[in-house]
Image (cartoon, rainbow, N blue to C red):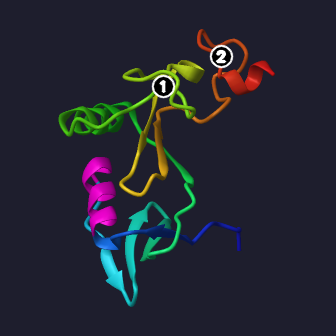
Amino acid sequence: MAVSLNHTIVHARDKDATARFLTALLGLPAHRNLAHFAVVQVGETSLDFIETQGPIVSRHFAFLVSDAEFDAIFTRITARGLSYWADPFHREPRAINHWDDGRGVYFDDPNGHLLEVITRAYGSGGLDATHVNPLLRR
């Protein structure tokens, strides 16, 4: 059997609201409740949201999507008036990146987790890309 990531637990203030936020923006099926989790299925992996009143440490989740899916997701981001950036450090507001000759955008969820939507996997454009991924330049 090949190893694959089955699920990860994600802390949230309101698990159901966070799950609805993510499924609505990404165009995913509605979440399901499983005991104390709000489960969002993303391909073969699920994000299992659990509520906490303690501090939430920001985590990063990147979603690889098609060009058409990117267009739809980006439209939903802007329609909601969400802040977005071309970079993970929030230095390039109201912009998308074109790393690996694709498109990418970062935005925050209601708990401060950093979400990213990309159309090309990191490094897939190689050093010959018009817009070389900055990770390859180091």
Direction top: furthest residue: 130
Direction bottom: furthest residue: 35
Direction front: furthest residue: 54
Q: What residue sits 32% from the left and 82% below the top? A: 33
Q: Which amino acid does label 1 sit on?
A: Ala
Q: Say whether residue 47 is visible.
A: no
Q: In this view, does 8 lie above or below 37?
A: above
In the shown orientation, is residue 18 left or right of residue 52? left
In the shown orientation, is residue 94 left or right of residue 113? left
Q: Say whether residue 63 is visible.
A: yes
Q: Dot 1, how many residues are within 10 Å of its Cα: few (below 14), some (14-19), or many (20+)?
A: many
Q: Residue 86 carries which label?
A: 1
Measure the C-alpha gap from mark 2 to mark 1. Answer: 14 Å
Q: Does the magenta segment cover residue 12?
A: no
Q: Check disc 2 and report its element: helix, strand or loop.
A: loop
**Viewer-nearest residue: 58 or 48:** 58
Q: Can you give x and y, in whole percent of width and height, for residue 17 in the image?
A: 27, 66
Query: Start and end of the magenta stretch?
Result: 17-27
Q: What residue sits 42% from the left and 23% below the top? A: 93
Is the magenta region chiefly helix, strand or loop?
Answer: helix
Quadrant of the rendered image containing residue 39:
bottom left
Q: Can you give x and y, in whole percent of width and height, for residue 104 in the image?
A: 47, 30
Dots 2, 1 in contact, CB < 8 A = no
Number of callouts: 2
In the rendered view of the protein, which quadrant contains the C terminus? top right
Q: Does the magenta segment cover residue 25?
A: yes
Q: Can you give x and y, in whole percent of width and height, for residue 9 in the image?
A: 53, 72
Give the label, 2 or 1, closer to the camera: 1
Residue behind mark 2: 132
Q: Can you give x and y, in whole percent of width and height, for residue 128 in the image?
A: 69, 12
Q: What residue sits 65% from the left and 22% below the top? A: 133
Q: Which amino acid does label 2 sit on?
A: Val
